Image (tube, rainbow, N blue to C red):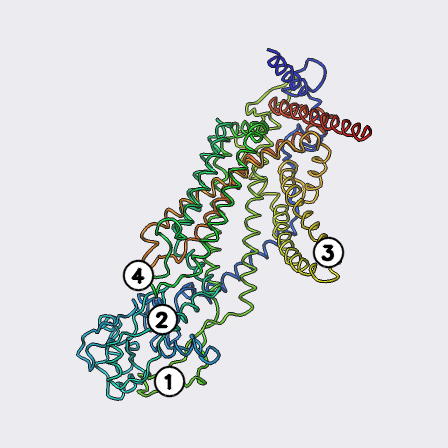
Amino acid sequence: MGKQTKDQSRRAAAEAAAISSPSSTPAYPPPAAAFADNEAGGSIRKPGIKKARRCQDLAFLSIISLLAFGFIVDTSFGFNRGDPHRLVYGLDYKGNVCGDRRAKPNLKDFQVRYWMNPNQLYWSGVYPDRYKLSTARSICLRNCPTTVSAGNGNASSQLSWVCDYPEGTYSGLSMRDWEQRNYDYFDLLTPDQIASSRNLTGPCYPVLFESVNLYWNCQPSPAPENNLLQLWNSMNGVQIQSGSILPQVVHDALSTPSAIFYRYMADLGRAWPVLFVCGGLLPMLLCMLWLIAIRYYVSVVTWLTFVLLNVFMILLTLYFYFKAGWLGNDAISAVIGTSGSDDLSVSFTELEHLKALAIIMTLVVFLTVVMTFVLLKRVTEALSITKVTVQAIGAVPSLVVYPAIPFMAFGLFFIYWLSALLYLFSAGKIRQNNCTYNSCASYDLYAQTVTQSGCCGYTLHSTHNIVWAILYHLFVLFWAISFIAACSVTTISGAIASYYWARGETAMWNGGDGMDWKGMGWFPVVSSAKLVLSYSLGSISLGSSIVPLVETFRVVLSAVQKRLKKAQRTPGGVAATVLNSGTQGCSGCIEWTLKFINRNAYVVIAISGKNFFRAAGRATVLIANNSMRVGTVNNMGRLFLSVAKLCVSLACAVFAFLMLDSHSFKTGHYRVSSPLFPVLFCLGLGYMAASLFFAVVGTGTDTILIAYCMDSEEHNGTPIFAPALLAETLTLHAERQDAVDADRHIQNVQRDDEDIYS
């Protein structure tokens, strides 16, 4: 009974705080005196969203327009010079990309690269300074050739051959006929061509080694089959080099960091349906359901979010264990198609990456479970301020759907950006290598003679301009994310601020003084978006440009810190220690700037229409002057939103694993080399979607608190427009904060007394 009386007294105090004067005039509707000079409404307007505005920071909008123009030029360069097939498929002896339908001949269905001369493979492993794998003669096939003869009545009916593309004197054979003959027209060769083929200079080369398709490259076995080698020797063929170095050469070429990264990038192109579903549709649906649920069941959704976070974290970790081969036998394999023998299935770095992530995820799961038990109760107690925001969402239900618009805009931009990125990574010029010093020779079907130019391989050469173009491409992505998020935050702030100043009322009120008050209007989101697009794009462009610039500076500082840490271990490293501390301090200041000033500046822009710097300064002053009242009330609520974002992104990652487990992504043309990059991209896209949607709650809370500070400052410390629940929440928060400060003071006094007596 005593507790109930105490709660009633608190509510009474909160209602009293909302009264504009000590008289019996009700807090709502506000009296005419409340319509005096104030920041939100102007000197002759009631408190609310300022309508009379002018365009701000137009110079920065022009700069952003130039940035967008540069992005178009950058992507056009990639689309003109690049080909994503180059990231995975190799180049043949004519410089064509395997699988390229525009090549001559048409290689649409021929995506597997096969090295025709085993001696060249051997020499590139024994003499790496003289012989390069890129100079070895290779050809594009549909599948790796078999050692079984085609039975075409050739001189060696038990020996299989792979011949050059049908051209020159054999141009009468189509690529279809060449494929049906198992790439073998040895029986049609002239005596000179047969002698050249036995000398391993073409146009046909014997298939003496079994091979498997290893990431679209044929990896030979260490030794030829005995009966085939004997048959080759009986034909007076040149000596064939063999040994474990043959498969190792191919393995090393496909295990370089650049080769692995190119395969990862190509995986994104193949897994575009997974990115569309698990990185686009699924997070949008989950976020909408979460916003609808939290509108009615705040406490239940809080518990459920933490539970699902742990469930999805455990499921994602188990999937990494499965793909790493530690649970079950579903580990990824480098062999495409029919699995080869054990000596051909060489372990690849992709598997090691998954094992490392499985270990990391295990540690993260442990920390997540511990965090859940520690923070769940505190977060539940700190969600009172979120309930006020939920009331605003209920009053403006279009806020639940609105984030889908900026997310779809980001999705369209991301599709274009990712496509251009794949082309940029594959941009460059294909040039023939210089292999005359290798005494390399091959048969030319047009000249009908052996030449030294036909066996030289081709390599993709990138320039420094492409590197700068890719860096610029990444910078534009960071800026676009910041710009779209800033537009969304500013629009949401305007709609929530309308709710605050109108106290959730949409109907008209005719006061005793004859003034009509329309409240927040029927379409506050549309009205707010109209103001943002008409007047504030320049300020948003400035604020969104600061974020990528500052983050780039932080990356540079991180690199400097790593170098300074190494210098600390050397003699006389005191100066390096001081500099390292200074860079860490700068990094902390930058983090503070991004976290507080930038976010709150958009709220002030939405309410008052100020330019970015004035809005940032105004928001900082408001928070500083009211830090005791609202400074820490929102920290735990933001932690809860971060947990909800992780929950959505982890769900997207788990469903991405499920889709990638389907047959279409394990075999055939759309086979991915590793699920790592598609899953991580779905994780990032899910977090981006959750950030845009859950900004309705986070930005709504920030807006209500800043509007509360404005309201309090403009009316001599008495916020007359604060909703009753907000006033009650902040009153209870102030009482708890005073109790904590009092306990801390008592403990300090007792500690001082103990020190005196001791």
Q: For mark 3, what is the residue?
A: 579
Of the numbered discs 4 and 2, the one sitting upstream in the chain is 2
Circles 4 and 2: CB atoms closer than 8 Å: no
Q: Position of residue 35 (x, y in %)?
A: 69, 25
Circle 1 or circle 2, nearest the eye? 1
- In the picture, the disc for residue 660 is none
Quadrant position of the N terminus in the picture: top right
What is the x, y in percent for residue 28? 63, 19
- CB within 8 Å, label 1 to label 3: no
> In the rendered structure, which disc, 1 or 2, sits on the residue that comes first in sequence?
2
Pointer 2 residue:
103
Image quadrant in which you'd find residue 454: bottom left
Mark 4: few/some/many CA within 10 Å (<14, 14-19, 20+): some
Circle 4: residue type: Ser
Q: CA distance from mark 4 to mark 2?
A: 30 Å
Which residue is under mark 1?
Answer: 441
Quarter assignment of residue 26: top right
Mark 4, mark 2: which one is toward the viewer?
A: 4
| Amino acid type at mark 3 | Leu
Q: Residue furthest left?
A: 153
Q: Quadrant of the C terminus?
A: top right
Relative vertical location of residue 357 with respect to residue 692 in this rendering, above or below: below
Q: Could you say which is closer to the camera, residue 508 or residue 99?
A: 99
Residue displayed at 59% across by 25% down: 503
Could you tell me how far apart the alpha carbons at marks 1 and 2 are, in whole angstroms?
24 Å
Q: Which mark is residue 339?
A: 4
Quadrant in the picture for residue 754: top right
